[in-house]
Amino acid sequence: MQAIYDLVIRAGRVVCPATGFDSASSVAIRGDRIVAVGREIDGSGRQQLDDPTAILLPGLIDLHAHPAKSGSIFSVDPDRHLLARGTTTVLSQGDAGASNLETYIRETIEQSQTQIVLAINLSSAGEAGPGGCFERLELVDVAACVAAIERFRSHIWGIAVNVSHHCCGQTDSREVFRRGLLVAEQTELPLLYGMRRPDDWPLEQQLRELRPGDVVTYCYRRTPHCIVQDGQVLDCVREARERGILFDVGHGRGSFDFNTAEAALRDGFAPDTISTDLQRGHVGQIPIHDLPLVMSKLRAVGMLERDIFQAVTSRPAQILGRDQEIGSLRVGSRADLVLLRWNEQSEPLVDVHGNVRSGRRWEAIATIRAGQLIAMECS
């Protein structure tokens, strides 16, 4: 008797960066698990998707965005703006701190279909605003942050510490960082780190303070801190990577430059992860700011397709410590998947400075989260 599945998806390419699988194939799902992958799958599904023009990947993982239903000045609805666009797991960059973490968990994490993991803000107020989150040093409370992490550790991956002028104002950025490092050491968690401009604090000194497993975001920014000089990646940046420091794109509204990305890629420095820094200010932009769009921008400047797919699936899953559950199409993994289609006729791609590249891009046409079909033909 042929097996009956809840959902069978057939695509022109089924790609699993974690295993190296890349072939016209099918994936069968029962409940919230992947139960079969192969060219020929015996049995049928109660639901079936068949698209020979599409690429089927593990659900995308965005390592830096701002999912929140309340309490954050940067908030976007995670199910509407992330899950419907192919992202099944997202790391919140500091949207909640010690004083509003319980509310964030109750209102955002527990009320969303999207899987949300938190880089807790070192400021107890999170991104509640107004002003930068570290402008009031008394809110940078080590004991409160540690206590919140210990209470809600299952929801927390690490600590968000952005020492930019926007976040710190007149506060001493080195003191903010020192306190962040204390929390990280006491809880044995990594940092998601936003750099200070080098004329205030040399980049080499900042990177030297980071530890293996810490993640530097905004890695392809042009100003005020840039990892490229005279067409080459700075020695201190390469040395940091050799020590185990990780580098994330964090596109954002002011943090992605085509020329920087091209120079870094030519010099052999691809990002570990690709992320959107999706926030309220992106809502309504055309084309829609999502992870497939940022992936397309990296492809336009020369990043290899296999490295792009890895940087939004298996690599962030590994960094989050969840690679046994998400980020792959292995049998037994959770059935988080995305169908992508390549659009040859889309609008030009533009970086934050107005520089333009080819408009061809990937678009999410279906998202599957824990075995449930969430969205079809996103626009």
Image (cartoon, rainbow, N blue to C red):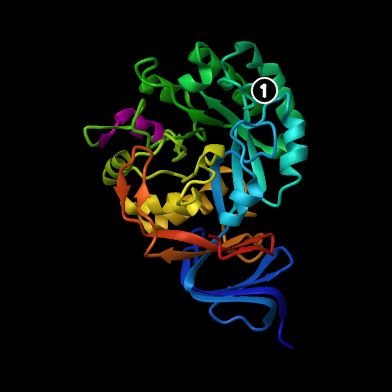
Residue 63, horizontal then vertical, whole percent:
54, 43
Secondary structure mostly seen in magenta is helix
How many marks overall? Answer: 1
For the residue pair 314 and 248, the one nearer the viewer reads as 248
Residue lying at the far bottom of the rendered structure: 1
User: Which of the 4 image quarters holds residue 264?
Assistant: top left
On the picture, is 306 further left or further right than 371? left
Where 147 sits versus 340, above or below? above
Q: Is residue 235 magenta?
A: yes
Disc 1 marks a residue whose amino acid type is: Ala
Q: Kindly identify the residue that appears in the image at 60 percent across and 19 percent down.
A: 182
Q: Kindly identify the residue that appears in the image at 46 percent across and 19 percent down.
A: 165
Where 276 sits versus 2, above or below? above
The residue range painted magenta reads 232-241
Query: Badge 1 is on which residue?
Result: 125
Q: Kindly identify the residue that appears in the image at 77 percent across and 32 percent down.
A: 102
